[in-house]
Amino acid sequence: MGIALSIEIYEDYGGPYEGKAGQFHWVFLDSSGQTHGPSIGFNSRWEAVADIERILATSIDKEEDNGR
């Protein structure tokens, strides 16, 4: 099992627009060798962190459900 993650921030105006117009890409390789990896847009860095946490938790839960 492995995870690769990259974050792109296209513009950073600071203040209320900090981190606007960005996305992160992730690739999750599960124990059966399948990869999963959409790109997800976000409007703030905090939103991206929340999405990353959700994706990782979901991926780990799926592995545990499969008895791995």
Image: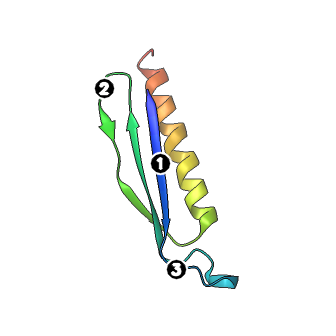
Q: Are marks 3 and 2 in contact (CB under 8 Å)?
A: no
Residue 16 place in picture, x, y as percent: 67, 83
- The N terminus, quarter of image: top left
Rounded to the nearest whole Å, what is the CA distance between mark 3 and mark 2?
Answer: 35 Å
Q: Are marks 1 and 3 in contact (CB under 8 Å)?
A: no
Mark 1 burial class by Cα count in 10 Å: few <14, some 14-19, many 20+: few
**Callout 1 secondary element:** strand
Q: Indicate which disc, 2 or 1, sits on the residue closer to the N terminus.
A: 1
68 relative to 34, above or below: above
Residue, x 52% and y 40% (percent of image)? 56
Mark drawn on residue 33: 2
Rounded to the nearest whole Å, what is the CA distance between mark 2 and mark 1?
Answer: 17 Å
Mark drawn on residue 20: none
Residue 26 place in picture, x, y as percent: 42, 48
Mark drawn on residue 5: 1
Q: Indicate which disc, 1 or 3, sits on the residue closer to the N terminus.
A: 1
Inspect the image, locate mark 3, and give the three-letter code of the amino acid beneath it.
Glu
Badge 3 is on which residue?
11
Inspect the image, locate mark 1, and give the three-letter code of the amino acid beneath it.
Leu
Inspect the image, locate mark 2, and give the three-letter code of the amino acid beneath it.
Gly
Rounded to the nearest whole Å, what is the CA distance between mark 1 and mark 3?
Answer: 19 Å
- Quarter of the image for residue 18 reads bottom right
**Callout 2 secondary element:** loop
Residue 42 place in picture, x, y as percent: 50, 67
Specify the farthest residue to the top: 67
Q: Indicate which disc, 3 or 2, sits on the residue closer to the N terminus.
A: 3
